[in-house]
């Protein structure tokens, strides 16, 4: 991508994280048209993955089926682009296509199908350790859901340690860190260690508040409320 296209996608990402979903979607759609015209398939995967994530976030706020469908549709198109143009797509974009689709499958309650996509995404990723740690956390979550609780738990802890080797002033690193912490809190709650769950989710909420991570802050608050109500109906 040229600098202008990268800047536009970066703006779309920032608007998404600020929960300005309509504005973010507009930026992604404009980028989509430009990147299709340029046949920039790596950039196109970044765009499709970002759009998929918008609807995943919305599906967690609102259970409307259309959000789930759109999450899957955009991620599936990213995989389709990868399958058709793999030789023209850089390894990082390939990894993003795989992880976006895996994430959509996981949201659609298909962890068994999601696992090989997450594993392949990690195996080919040229990203630094913090981003690879995010992927390892996803793999750990899937393993936990599939019944391999001990390995899943250990993988999330390993992933969190990898994430924390990054720049802790970086927004994305903090998003990945709090995502891992939120899942760890859910695991402890599901395993009936409520004290540890409360300790970890308190840490996550503090980080999310200090670094203005509005989406993670809302997730942490939801977990805290469920713990207060003795509920463990968590979505992993």
Image (tube, grey):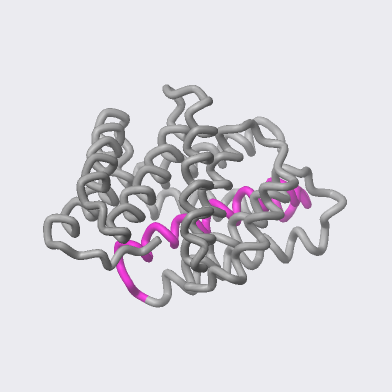
Q: Which one is in front, 194 or 236?
A: 194
Q: Which one is in front, 119 or 24?
A: 119
Identify which residue is drawn at 29% across, 51% down.
Answer: 219
On screen, residue 219 versus residue 117, left or right, reads left
Q: Position of residue 30 (x, y in %)?
A: 57, 51
Q: Is residue 215 depicted above or below 69 in this figure?
A: above
Q: Which residues are magenta?
A: 35-64
Q: Is residue 56 visible?
A: yes
Q: Position of residue 181 (x, y in %)?
A: 37, 43
Q: Is residue 46 depicted above or below 102 in this figure?
A: above
Q: Quadrant of residue 187?
A: bottom left
Specify the farthest residue to the left. Answer: 229
On screen, residue 228 versus residue 207, left or right, reads left
Identify which residue is drawn at 66% across, 52% down.
Answer: 45
Identify which residue is drawn at 58% across, 54% down.
Answer: 49
Is 63 magenta? The answer is yes
Q: Position of residue 157 (x, y in %)?
A: 47, 41
């Amino acid at each position: 991508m040229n600098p202008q296209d990268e800047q536009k996608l970066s703006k779309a990402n920032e608007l998404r994280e600020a929960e300005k979903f309509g504005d973010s979607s507009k930026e992604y759609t404009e980028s989509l048209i430009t990147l299709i015209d340029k046949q920039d398939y790596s950039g196109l995967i970044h765009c499709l993955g970002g759009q998929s994530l918008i609807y995943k976030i919305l599906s967690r706020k609102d259970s409307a089926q259309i959000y789930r469908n759109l999450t899957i549709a955009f991620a599936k198109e990213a995989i389709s682009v990868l399958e058709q143009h793999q030789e023209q797509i850089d390894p990082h974009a390939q990894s993003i296509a795989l992880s976006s689709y895996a994430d959509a499958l996981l949201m659609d309650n298909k962890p068994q199908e999601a696992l090989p996509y997450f594993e392949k995404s990690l195996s080919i990723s040229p990203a630094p350790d913090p981003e690879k740690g995010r992927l390892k956390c996803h793999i750990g979550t899937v393993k936990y859901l599939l019944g391999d609780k001990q390995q899943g738990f250990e993988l999330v802890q390993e992933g969190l340690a990898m994430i924390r080797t990054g720049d802790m002033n970086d927004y994305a690193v903090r998003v990945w860190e709090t995502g891992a912490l939120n899942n760890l809190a859910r695991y402890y709650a599901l395993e009936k260690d409520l004290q540890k769950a409360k300790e970890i989710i308190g840490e996550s909420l503090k980080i999310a508040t200090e670094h203005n991570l509005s989406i993670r802050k809302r997730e942490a608050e939801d977990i805290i409320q469920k713990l207060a109500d003795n509920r463990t109906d968590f979505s992993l």
